[in-house]
Image (tube, rainbow, N blue to C red):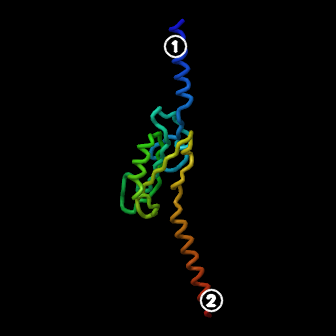
Amino acid sequence: MFRNSNIVAAIIILGIDIALGLECYVCLDQDGNNGKCLQTIMTCPAEADQCMTEIRWGTTPYWQAGAEKQFYISKKCATKQTCERTMRKTMPFCTHVWYEDWRCSECCGGDRCNYFIISGGSPMVPSLLLSAASASVTLLFSTILLRA
């Protein structure tokens, strides 16, 4: 009887451990926050208490002059210490400057909390530059027309 109760207790404890494990989206070096990055979910190991997302913007691995830049998205389970260390390491390079290579990381602590990407995911800087250029041209033409 004692042996059976130990087995039942072990099954219950393992079941609770599995049920309480953090779930994160996981992917490696995808070209956007879609496909694998939104469909692959992992139950994290017990020591992992954070979901981590790394966003890179840079040239393709087979670099050549004039090569276009693209996003690289990676998501994984991590410990809080790993998250903090990675964020400290990438912070100086988290510029979002569209013509430079950059890297950012972010962490969160809830089930599937890394679905969205807060730091990046779409080339916002080029569109902001285009908007600023359009506004400048409009202002220039309106000034010229007012003087005429």
User: Of discs 2 and 1, which sits in the foreground?
Assistant: 1
Quarter the C terminus occupies: bottom right
Q: Is residue 99 above or below residue 91?
A: below
Task: Decide: few, some or many residues near mark 2? Use Cα within 10 Å; few <14, some 14-19, many ≥20.
Answer: few
Label 2: which residue?
145
Residue positioned 48% across, 45% down in the render: 52
Residue type, label 2:
Leu
Q: Nearer the viewer, residue 95 or 34?
A: 95
Which of the 4 quarters of the picture holds residue 99?
A: bottom left
Q: Nearer the viewer, residue 141 or 63?
A: 141
Label 1: which residue?
7
Residue positioned 46% across, 55% down in the render: 70
Residue type, label 1:
Ile
Task: Decide: few, some or many residues near mark 1? Use Cα within 10 Å; few <14, some 14-19, many ≥20.
Answer: few
**Element carrying mark 1:** helix
Q: Is residue 79 above or below residue 106?
A: above
Residue positioned 39% across, 63% down in the render: 66
**Element carrying mark 2:** helix
Mark identifier at residue 81: none
Q: Mark 2 to mark 1: distance in Å?
A: 87 Å
Q: Residue furthest top?
A: 1
Residue 115's x, y, as percent?
56, 45
Q: Is residue 9 above or below residue 116?
A: above
In this rendering, position of residue 93 left or right of residue 119 = left
Q: Residue furthest bottom?
A: 148
Quarter the N terminus occupies: top right
Residue 139's x, y, as percent?
59, 82
Q: Nearer the viewer, residue 92 or 29?
A: 92
Mark earlier in primary sequence (2, 1): 1
